[in-house]
Amino acid sequence: MGETAGRETMGFQTEVRQLLQLMIHSLYSNKEIFLRELISNASDAADKLRFEALASPDLIRDDPDLKVKISFDKVAGTLSVSDNGIGMSRQELIENLGTIARSGTAEFLQRMTGDEQKDAKLIGQFGVGFYSAFIVADRVEVLSRKAGLNPDDAVRWESDGQGEFTIESAVLADRGTTVILYLKDTERDFQESFRLEALIRKYSDHIAFPVLLTVPSADGVTENTVNSATALWTRPRSDVSDDEYKEFYKHLSHDFADPLTWSHNKVEGKREYASLLFIPGTAPYDLWNRDAPKGLKLYVQRVFIMDDAEQFLPLYLRFVKGVIDSSDFPLNVSRELLQQNPDLDAMRGALTRRVIDMLTKLSAEESDSYTKFWQEFGQTIKEGVVEDKQNSAKLMKLLRFATTNSDSASQTQTLNDYISRMAEGQDKIYYIVGETYETAKSSPHLEQLRAKGIEVLLLHDRIDPWMVDHLTDYDGKAFQDVGRGKLVLPDSEGDITQDAFNDANKPLLKKIRKALKDRVETVNVSQRLVDSPACVVTSDQDLSPQLRRMLEASGQALPATKPILEINIDHPLVARLSVESDDDRFGELSRIVLDHALLAEGAQLDNPADYVRRMNRYLLDTENGNH
Ligand code: ADP
């Protein structure tokens, strides 16, 4: 080393600068995680080299034992993490340690609140990796020589984490990467070997490569292997402690928090593979970004093959983190070859069932954890109910709802809970969909059901209109939208009553139909209402208004349809309509009744200004004693 040829100073990408600042403040109470992150990177680098060496054995021949070394120098005030893995070229160093490649980073950073505790959580799920070195160091140096390059093609990177880094050529005898931390004065206790040893054991015991700690001794230095250096998933379940599983999850996912649960299995027989699957405690910030990386980490006979192998689980289970290690795939398996592998479907089926079983168990045995899971990932399970026909019965048991039985928007009730409380003679599962919990809860459609003590599921997630559009029944009971078609309640006679009521009020209905003919399909006497004068309903064949709004918002053009207006024949406003002899005023009041019904259901009026004018006129008219 020592050369300064080609020295360049460059600025960090804006996002990196922001991230560095936020991280140093918000992760300070967690500062020791930098060691996990650096060892994790070193182990990934060893994994990558072993993979490359499958095709080019020369890359590894002169130094075949992959390992990670930790050492410190009390005089210089440094701590170093060094590996003989894949290494980085000049260009790779610039890209990897100067920018953040992940999409949505800027958007993620915008969500930072300035509240340190909240931000620490957010940053934790983002995964900060290498940059965490700056929590404890005021200067970081990275020396790297990429596998296959000559000693004098090495590079040296350096930064104080403020805004710029420098990069220059270097000469390195050994392949791989060394990260040297110039520790802040306050962080010198990271140079105590007992502390380092404890941290390595805590955070990196599961790393498949030996992690060596170099410590001064009587005759110079000694190197001790600190970790057990076997891939965790190859060990028998009974030998692995909960803490080891948790640490392995953090290594794998870069999450700071514990997973909610996990499932570790070995399949033997026709197909042989080990799988270790984790359910995270918080949704990643990019759960809804379709291009975000997802999938399991694939190993073949303990050799790392690829990150984000998305072929092993359906899209709706994209939140699952884990490892799959198969003995059956060839070592040169690529994404394309994987896709064509005849065993893939069966494996995907088995892994999917494993995740569903794990969630079912969680819901039965640890309801607090399941509630947390549901808050974070419930909407993906709703995707699954529709998309995964094979497992939809099991997935429907995992659904949780808010209902009219409680005053809370939190979704805690199962379909079985609902069924166990059904009224005598009730054979349907009633639900209502609203834009928000409040609109659903206060919809006029619920009035009669409430009066009769019939429970209704209150659906208000973004995905709900789409989901319920695909649901037919559960446990032999049909789902019924209370805002749709004719509502037949357990102790009423449906059609017969409605027809009888309609007949008894023929002239009034006819008059309203005429007044509103451009805007409604028809007008009926309602059996849904108690307190409201009217409501709008959708016919059985039409799209629900919520689904319609959702599709329209996504840019689809749909043919216009008209709602059905239902009036509450016992309501004083309707009584007033029936005695109104002035045609203009009758028309005016009919339109107001319709607009109010639309507003109550969460719809936007086509012409709000017109509505306001009409309403004002009507109010003034009332003041003048015309009603
Ligand atoms: P992440 O590990 O989440 O990708 P990092 O910020 O920790 O994020 O690292 C960024 C990239 O830098 C890594 O993806 C890897 O390509 C590269 N890198 C980091 N450390 C090493 C290392 N020791 N050897 C080789 N490449 C590394």
Image (tube, rainbow, N blue to C red):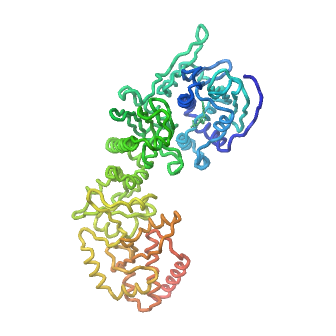
- The C terminus - image quarter: bottom left
Instruction: Report which quarter residue 136 is drawn in.
Output: top right
Quarter occupied by the N terminus: top right
Asked if 317 appears above or below 175 in the picture, the reply is: below
| Residue 74 coordinates in the image, percent (x, y) | 64, 18
The answer to whether 231 appears left or right of 480 in the picture is right
Q: Is 144 drawn above or below residue 355 in the view shown?
A: above
Q: In this view, does 17 lie above or below 588?
A: above
- Front position in the image: 275 or 187: 275
Q: Which residue is drawn at 46% across and 76% down?
A: 595
Task: Please give the count of numbered marks on the rendered protein.
Answer: 0
The image position of residue 343, as x and y in percent, is 39, 40
Instruction: Report whether residue 250 is seen.
Output: yes
Query: Which is nearer the eye, 239 or 446?
Result: 239
Q: Where is residue 238 in the image (x, y as percent from the top left)?
A: 35, 27
User: What residue appears at the point 34 percent right and 43 percent down from the top-left corner?
Assistant: 357
Q: Can residue 33 be seen in this view?
A: no
- Quarter for ligand 1? top right
Q: Residue furthest top?
A: 219
Q: Nearer the viewer, residue 475 or 91?
A: 91
Instruction: Name the spot of residue 467 as percent of width and height, x first.
Output: 40, 59
Relative to 520, is 57 on the left or the right?
Answer: right
Q: Could you tell me which residue is drawn at 51 percent across and 18 percent down?
A: 225
